[in-house]
Amino acid sequence: MNPMESPPPRRRRDKLFIIAEILEIAREGTLKTQIMYKANLSFAQLKEYLSLLTELNLLEKNLIDEKTYYKTTKKGLKFLESYKEILDLIKNTKNSVKKLPISWIKNLH
């Protein structure tokens, strides 16, 4: 599953999915308004996630021409890689894994 793919309609996105989506959007560096629109977040949600991700050193802030850009760090790229590996592992074994939370299984397409 690609974190940039939208989950099926009417399903809530889990926090890890949103984090992966933000990190993917900011891979090359971007403004926070672009992250907000592309990830379909409210401004309040955006502030919360940007604060968390910069604290965890998954995103870095850079001031360029008086504008703040957010870019995924090496640690953030490692998170994305691990996230995708875990989703692939679960997807490939979903028929044999019976005790996963239903919400995880439903997001595996």
Image (tube, grey):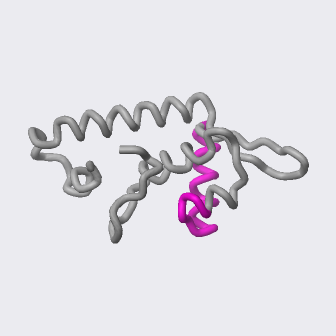
- 28 with respect to 97 (left or right): right
Residue 89: where, in percent of width, then height?
A: 26, 33
- 57 with respect to 109 (left or right): right
Q: Nearer the viewer, residue 82 or 52?
A: 82
Residue at the image position 20 percent from the left and 36 percent from the top: 92
Residue at the image position 42 percent from the left and 58 percent from the top: 6
Residue 27: where, in percent of width, then height?
A: 61, 39
Residue 96: where, in percent of width, then height?
A: 9, 38
Q: Nearer the viewer, residue 6 or 49?
A: 6
Residue 31: where, in percent of width, then height?
A: 72, 53
Asked whether 15 falls inside the magenta stretch, the response is no
- Considering the whole magenta stretch, tell me its main secondary structure: helix
Question: Where on the picture, by quarter, is residue 59?
Answer: top right
Residue at the image position 18 percent from the left and 47 percent from the top: 100
Question: Where on the picture, by quarter, is residue 57?
Answer: top right
- 105 with respect to 99 (left or right): right
* Image: magenta residue range: 37-57
| Count of numbered circles on the image | 0
In the rendered image, the quadrant that contains the N terminus is top left
Asked whether 54 falls inside the magenta stretch, the response is yes
